[in-house]
Image (tube, rainbow, N blue to C red):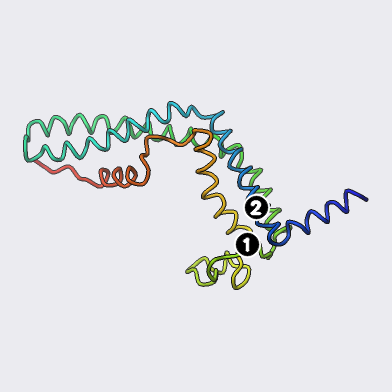
Amino acid sequence: MLSLIFQNTFLDLIGSPPGSMIFVLLLSVITASISTLLTRWLVDTEEINRKQTQIKAHEEEKQKIVELAEVDPERYKKARKKWERKDGMLKKTQQRMALQRMKPTCVTFLPMIIIFGVLNSVVFSGAQVALSPMHANDIPLIGNFISAGPIWINFTAWYFLCSLGINTLVQRLLKLQSQASGGMGGMFAGQKAKALEFPDV
């Protein structure tokens, strides 16, 4: 009897704001922590970071080789061949890294689908979970999917927003985030290097 009363009280508490907002926030913290701990356990993060540093340096080297084309064509040809041989090996390394990173997802995928399916369809079905700073319906393409009213968003939208910040925070606290990425600047620099084409000399 007491357990039934407690269960009904708990569901009432998390079924509407602010209880729903806090519950989903805590859920995202727990999920991010489990995922990060599994990554530390199943993935050799030090090796991944070392390889990421090598890949980043390799991509940056491409820019220097392209600049050699007009200055020293002979040296450019040799450097280009060496870079392309190394690039083939590093692409295989990237594939192995991607498989390594998938290990935690393989463990958590099915349980998370079941848990979130139950929460989304039973506990928070059509519920107003969190206030939105704007009309959710005004967001192109996904407005109807995330909206739970004129100024409210649903469980899926609020969990996604919480996860964006919480995942990064938990990874930094547990020192899991790669130091090779160099932030947004490093990411854009890497994309720019990838977009470069070797000129024919």
Identify whether 22 is placed above or below 101: below
Q: Is residue 40 left or right of residue 110?
A: left
Element class at badge 2: helix
* Quarter that holds the C terminus: top left
Nearest the viewer among 76 and 200 is: 76
> Badge 1: few (under 14), some or many (20 or more) residues near its Cα, within 10 Å?
many
Element class at badge 1: strand
Identify whether 85 is placed above or below 163: above
Q: Which mark is residue 32?
A: none
Task: Identify which amino acid the numbered label 2 is placed on.
Answer: Val
Nearest the viewer among 36 and 20 is: 20
Q: Which mark is residue 130?
A: 1
* Position in image of residue 56 (x %, y %): 31, 35
* Position in image of residue 77 (x %, y %): 12, 33
Q: Residue tagged by mark 2?
A: 24
What's the residue at 64%, 45% (across, down)? 112
Asked whether the beta carbons under mark 2 and mark 1 sit within 8 Å of each other, the answer is: yes
Nearest the viewer among 110 and 160 is: 160
> Badge 2: few (under 14), some or many (20 or more) residues near its Cα, within 10 Å?
many
Q: Quadrant of residue 11?
A: bottom right
* Position in image of residue 20 (x %, y %): 69, 57
What's the residue at 51%, 38% (across, down)? 171
Task: Identify which amino acid the numbered label 1 is placed on.
Answer: Ala
* Position in image of residue 44 (x %, y %): 48, 27
What's the residue at 61%, 47% (across, down)? 28
Q: Is residue 73 left or right of residue 38?
A: left
Precedes in sequence: disc 2 or disc 1: 2
